[in-house]
Image (cartoon, grey):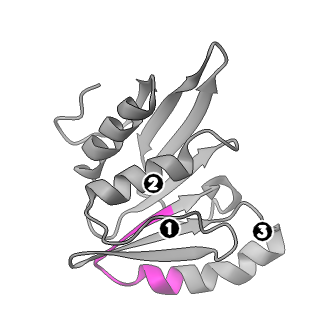
Amino acid sequence: MILRKPMSGNHTFLVKNLQALTDFAEKFSGQLKPGDVVALIGTLGSGKTTFTQHLCKALRATSKVTSPTFTLINEYSAGVLTILHSDLYRLQETEIQNFLPELEARLENPNTITLVEWADKAPQLMYTWRLSFSLLPDNPDARNIHVSSC
């Protein structure tokens, strides 16, 4: 897996195990810049939150990263950078419509990177990156991550 120059277009990466997911998150962190909004899409257990934990570590977040399924937004400090981690899994369409103004207001901070799990439930947001996680049926530890820049 090579992420040496800035990505554009569409790429699919085979991530064979947890160490490879950690490596991918570290390399992908180098692609991000303040203001980026990352859509994380995939089924339950496909690796969205685990990826986010490793990505935040690579970005030098100072606190433990947990799923925001019930809080809707977790915020982490990484030096001058703020990382917002949102999860839309349990929200219905009208709840998403009510929640989006709060999320969008927090996106106005120019030193923020935002990660949105279940982003396919809010296609109206302007995403910089889209990462789609899919499990491989023959190996429960492996997954494909399809990355596209928007």
Task: Tell me which amino acid carries mark 2.
Answer: Thr
Considering every residue shown, the one lying at the far left of the view is 4
Which label sits on residue 52? 2
Task: Tell me which amino acid carries mark 1.
Answer: His
**Does residue 150 appear to the left or right of 136 in the view shown?**
left
Closer-to-camera residue (63/21): 63
- Residue 83, percent across and down? 38, 71
Task: Tell me which amino acid carries mark 3.
Answer: Leu
Does residue 129 appear in this view? Answer: no
Give above or below for 130 relative to 103.
above
- Residue 80, percent across and down? 21, 79
Earlier in the chain: of badge 2 and badge 1, it is 2
Give residue 137's quadrant in the image: top right
Q: Callout 3: few (<14), some (14-19), or many (20+) C-alpha neighbours within 10 Å?
A: some
Q: CA distance from mark 2 to mark 1?
A: 8 Å
**Does residue 99 appear to the left or right of 49 in the view shown?**
right
Considering every residue shown, the one lying at the far front of the view is 64
Does residue 79 appear in this view? Answer: yes
Considering every residue shown, the one lying at the far top of the view is 138
Q: CA distance from mark 3 to mark 1?
A: 15 Å
Q: Which residue is mark 1?
A: 85
Q: Which residue is mark 3?
A: 91
Q: Are marks 2 and 1 in contact (CB under 8 Å)?
A: yes
Q: Which residues are magenta?
A: 104-115
Give above or below for 102 relative to 135.
below
- Residue 28, percent across and down? 30, 45
- Residue 114, percent across and down? 43, 67
